[in-house]
Amino acid sequence: MRAALALALLRLCLAKVNFAPYFFDNGAGSSDGNMALFNLPEDTPVDSRLPCHLPGSHVYTLNGTDPEGEPVSYHISFDPSTRSVFSVDPNFGNITLIEELDREMEDEIEAIISISDGLNLVAEKVVILVTDINDEAPRFLQEPYTVQIPEDTPAGSSIFEVHAVDKDTGSGGSVTYFLQNMPATRFTVDYHSGVLHLRAGTTLDYEKARAHFVTVVAQDGGGQLRGAAAVFSATTTVTVSVEDVQDVGPVFMGTPFHGYVYEDTVPGSEVLTVVAMDGDRGKPNRLLYSLMNGSDDAFDINATSGAIVVTQSPAQLRREVYELRVQVTEVSAAGSPAAQATVPVTIRIMDINNHPPMFYGERGPQTRFELSLSEHPPPGEILRGLKVTVKDSDQGANAKFALRLVGLGGAFRVVPQTALKEAQVTVLAENLAAIDFEKFRVLTFQLLATEVDTAEKFSATADVVVQLLDTNDNAPRFTSPHYVARVPEDAPGGSTVVAVRAVDVDTGPWGEVTYSIYGPRADLFQVHFSTGVICTQPWSSLDAEAIARYSFRVRAEDAGGRHDLAKVTVLLLDVNDHPPQFGQSIQEKTMVLGTPVKIEATDLDAEAPNNLVDYSITSAEPASVFDIDARTGEIRLKSSIRSLDALRSITHNGDCTWALEVQAKDRGSPSFSTMAVLRIDITDAETLPRSPMDTFLTQTRDEPVKAVGVLAGAMAITVAITALVSTATFWHNKKSNKVLPVRRVFRRQPRPAPRAAHIKWLKCNRTKAAAKFVLKEDPPSENCNGSLGTLPSPRAPMPPPLPGVAPNPGAAPPTVPTVSGSLTSLQHQGSPKRSALGSPIQSALVSELRQQFEKKSRADKVHF
């Protein structure tokens, strides 16, 4: 029992001993602990106090522990006189910024943080440093800025200093200065000090500008603000007032000065007042007026006001006009005379209006003036040949008159428009379009002078006649910008092509037009320099087949160099001067039964119908069994001939060979024609020995693209198969790793060559019309069918050759029913084993053809 009591007492004593909690000191730069040496940028965002806090509002975490492992809570407090900048989560120690920071207002924050385990409370005083961010703009001190400087301040002088401060630190607190609109101002500012200078090479002038407004910009060095670069600036205006200095003399205002004395004016009356001002308007000096000369004691002036008065009655005045000279003098502040200025003053003595204006010429009064003037004068040109003076003998206002022109609708204007007493009249060209020789050769208008300020309104007129002189103001103009001429190509040299015409509305030498031509191939033509008739050169020879169109330029130029251009196109009219021409005068064709053959002749004429050819068969041997298409030249068997048997029954020896005389005739006028001899061998398609390649080429002869595509595909497949077989063989041998035995190759004995069919050819010499017809034998190794092409090799085996048979004059030699369609020359290339002449029937046919061709050739020569 005692032991249990002692144990309970021991436990009670141990329970009363409880250690206090403490913060972790993680040092500077840590985001949790006891906030030792903690600093925070002033642009840190604050807590929005909403259910979802803004990112970045959590700034620190208090972190500590209790030795007994008891849960701890955190607290933060501030001095009652300061702001509560932070709040803390008591359970987790998360410190949140709840008030915006401003380093310029408060660069450090004192706070008391505490940690408690429920029994013990541990508190620490911490200082949080607020670091600077570039968030302040420069601010100018002691605004507004106003400075006064004299206008004679030397260029480059320092006139003022502006000063701006930026509360930020570092580069954000450094301030530099510059001016807005730098090129437009007369001032400069020092980049660092802010001292304002008068720009070098410039001066101030009070009379032109009494004040200048200079905008100065202060800009900080920039920095970071909320993660982005920021630069702040401020502007201020410096008002520069210019002080006037005495550097400009007095100036009269309202010049010229005119005064009038009337018949009822009494002595002592004011005639007029002259007004002058000191040119230095800022600090003007006192002015004094005086008369220098010209008054003859008839006038006097008030020294201070400048009023001029008459001292005598009008009846005592001896002159009609008085020219006075008035002087004004500046008086300085010290009372000494300074700058001076003078001005003339005209005073007229007015009388009763009893004289109208009058016009005068060089010899006295005149009411008609004549002169000459070149058309289209420059704007404002003076009519120098017009010397007119208008006078009014009255005095004063009675002698004032107005001048104007009557007629022509503003072609001229008169100067002056108003005058007093007398004026020299000047007439200026105004409406240049009306002063045109081609429109009006004579211009007539009136000068009208009318009194202005009188009740009578006396007036006078004078007629002015202007003879216009023509100038070279118009260029020649062709009647058409493009001339097209058509000329036969056989026109002789010197033939007229076309007549061009250009008109120049000017007169005299300016209206005379000369012509010339230039351009590619213009040397074949010539133009008459004055008539504009274009002809061919005497030596030129035109050929529509060579060049059917000529284009060149024709130029019309007057004596002053003004010109115009037109295009000339010469189209050559084709003349039928070329007969149709066959490729050869004797041709050979092979006709497969049911398929036409075609002949073709070419006419070198340039245009239809001269180059259109019609075809016809003039004779056929041994019989007329063919029809020919007159347009295309296609020759077909008559529809009644449907088999070779029918043809063999017509020929003498049954060899299906025909000789045709074919004519090609153009459609020109006169018409030309040409003859040719055509030999046609007729065969049946079934009797032609063809390989598969021959059959394919025959079927696709009208579709060459298809044939090339099929052949290319076949070659590609062959290459691919060969590559596959070679690859498979290579890999098979490589895997087996065996040496292949040497293969023995046995060469097959060649079979005897098949008996070649000997075919007779009809030959002609191109150089001699209707030359000898010869028969030749093709070598056995050559293919005899030119229209089917060379037969591919190898061929199918041929039957053994037939035994030799002696030639029999009465029997036709064995032939293959096809003949080559190629042309052959007269050279004898036949085998020596065969005779140049065949059977008697063939020899007779050849002789007859030769005679007919020679007859036709002679007829054609006579025709041409």
Image: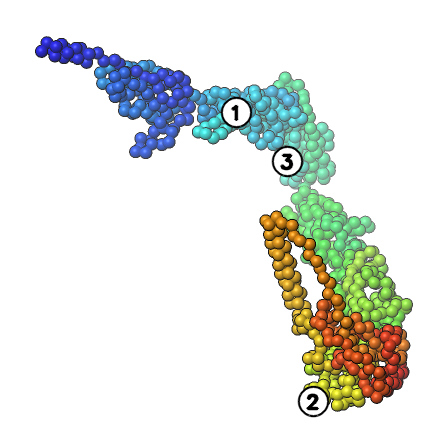
What residue type is disc 2 on? Ser
| In-front residue for pair 512/455 | 512
- Sequence-first tag of 3 and 1: 1
Residue corresponding to mark 1: 221
* 726, 92: nearer the viewer: 726
Q: CA distance from mark 2 to mark 1?
A: 112 Å
Disc 3 to disc 2, C-alpha distance: 124 Å
| Callout 2–callout 1 Cβ contact below 8 Å | no
Question: What residue is disc 3 on?
Answer: 254
Q: Nearer the viewer, residue 466 or 659?
A: 659
Q: Residue at x 36, y 28 (%)?
A: 57
**Residue 736 can be seen in this image:** yes
Callout 3 environment at 10 Å: few (<14), some (14 to 19), or many (20+)?
few
User: Which residue bears the numbered disc 2?
Assistant: 640
Contact between marks 3 and 1 (CB within 8 A): the answer is: no
Could you tell me residue 643's position as x and y percent? 70, 86
**527 left or right of 681 in image:** right
> What x and y, as percent, mark residue 740?
65, 52
Q: Amino acid at mark 1?
A: Gly
Q: Position of residue 620 (x, y in %)?
A: 79, 86
- What SS does tag 3 mark? loop
State whether residue 544 is above or below residue 472.
Answer: below
Q: Identify the residue at the far left of this view.
A: 1
